[in-house]
Image (spheres, grey):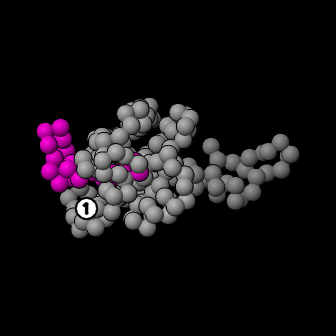
Amino acid sequence: MLSFANDGSGERGSVVQVAHQIASRALIFVRWVKLLIRKAPLVVLHAEDELADAHLVKTAVSANQITANLFQVSDGTEVLKFLREPDMRFAGAKRPDLILLDLYMSGMDGRECLTVLKKDENLRSIPVVILSMSDAESDIVDCYALGASGYITKPVDVHQYNMKIKHLFDYWIGLVRLPTNSY
């Protein structure tokens, strides 16, 4: 129920506060409607060479009841293989709506993979979000310059990690509009 809430001082809340309440509730409603309307789960390709970090993302997706098909690979070479020549592990997988890319991986690292993705005419439209332990400004600047759609520093705390993954998916599922998988 919306009201000009009494804050204990006996004064009524401002019109701005009520407008903020309405806007907040409308945004939540819009997110839920988008989730209900979306015909298929978000297809996400996650590249991570550390099994513990890969597990954290998978657990956060499950714990937050996020509707997504999550495919996990261990380096940039496997990202490109998934996208260009899927093997039996990924038979029938659709083109991802989103790629989550660790920056420092063995083999082809995230920076090199991001460079290849954004130079490829057929792949450059896929949003790529960097998930990295690095908080170095140079890494952040480099990734955005290469075409990253976002950069998230992995927190050490599991609860914070879960919340960051939840907010990431809230944004990509409930707020932005992505093209269909047919592009």
Please say whether residue 36 is visible from this viewpoint. Answer: no
Give the residue furthest to the right.
9
Q: How many dots with numbers?
A: 1
Seen at 78% across and 45% down, the residue is 6
Left of 89 or right of it: where is 6?
Answer: right
- Which one is in front, 160 or 116? 116
Kindly state the secondary structure of the residue where label 1 is placed: loop
Stretch of the chain drawn in magenta: 80-103
Q: Position of residue 59 (x, y in %)?
A: 41, 32
Residue type indicated by callout 1: Leu
Residue denoted by label 1? 123
In front here: 98 or 9?
98
Q: Quadrant of the N terminus?
A: top right
Q: Residue at x 28, y 42 (%)?
A: 73
Image coordinates of residue 180 in percent, x first then y, are: 26, 57
- Left or right, 6 with respect to 45, comes to right
Please tell me how crowded label 1 is: few (under 14), some (14-19), or many (20+) other residues with Cα within 10 Å. some
Residue at image point 86% right, 45% down: 9
Based on the picture, tell me whether residue 73 belongs to the magenta stretch: no
